[in-house]
Image (cartoon, grey):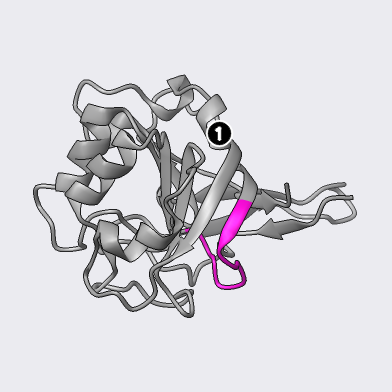
Amino acid sequence: MKKIWDISPPIDASSPVFPGDTPFQLQWTAEISPTCPVNVSAITLSPHVGSHADAPLHYDPTGVAIGQVDLQTFIGPCRVIHAIGVGPLIHLQHLARKLEHLPERVLVRTYASFPEQAFDSQLTAFAPQTLTALADLGVKLIGIDSASIDPASSKTLDSHQVIRTRKLRVLENLQLDLIEEGDYELIALPLKLMSADASPVRAILREL
């Protein structure tokens, strides 16, 4: 049996969210009792809580919602590359030693320890030129363990605009603490939310 690594952070009321975004909340609408046979909950959350896939609608006013995005890109061979402590932006030289014979999916680890309890306003993001270069190398999906591929303070979202023009898919908030550099199979399917700008994913890696 192939080994599986769960790269989705836990989601609960303490999960960090982008400042101003909707945190996770859960309420019980029914509870097991002599008159009720089941527990039933209602959840409220931003689709950007935890590991998630952005839809083009998130960064393009005419883009499609996540339920309309082709799933094929979210399944298949991927490479995990470490860029821990490289500074505010990931440049191509930070990845250069692992770029030969790239699969179509690249995940980048920037944290020595993923921030499960607090939002990181100093998160490491991608330099836009890095994403352009990866697209030129045939990459179709990029993923990162930080909350955004752009700096948290960015108002222009230059890296998101690169993935818009180059039609890349993106995963954010992956938890890669236990993942060594190398090649894996990625499975990270978004929900079929037909009008949403993103979706939570249960992201896993599987040995090839």
Name the secondary structure under disc 1. loop
Q: Is residue 158 left or right of residue 131?
A: left
Compared to residue 145, the image places residue 166 above or below, namely above
The magenta stretch spans which residues? 174-183
Name which quarter of the figure residue 195 lies in: top left
Q: Position of residue 168 (x, y in %)?
A: 35, 33
Q: Is residue 64 visible?
A: yes
Query: Which residue does the image show at 90% across and 50% down from the upper left?
Result: 1
Q: Is residue 181 magenta?
A: yes
Query: Which residue does the image show at 18% across and 38% down from the upper left?
Result: 161
Q: Amino acid at mark 1?
A: Leu
| Residue lying farthest to the left in this orientation | 156
Q: Position of residue 188 (x, y in %)?
A: 58, 42
Query: Which residue does the image show at 33% across and 78% down from the upper left?
Result: 85
Query: Which residue does the image show at 36% across and 55% down from the upper left?
Result: 22
Near-viewer residue (28 or 98): 98
Q: Is residue 16 left or right of residue 136?
A: right
Count numbered badges in the picture.
1
Compared to residue 137, the image places residue 120 above or below, namely below
Q: Is residue 8 visible?
A: no
Near-viewer residue (160 or 28): 160
Q: Position of residue 35 (x, y in %)?
A: 86, 48
Dominant secondary-structure state across the stretch colored magenta: loop
Near-viewer residue (200 or 77): 77
Compared to residue 119, the image places residue 137 above or below, namely above
Residue topped by disc 1: 191
Q: Is residue 180 magenta?
A: yes
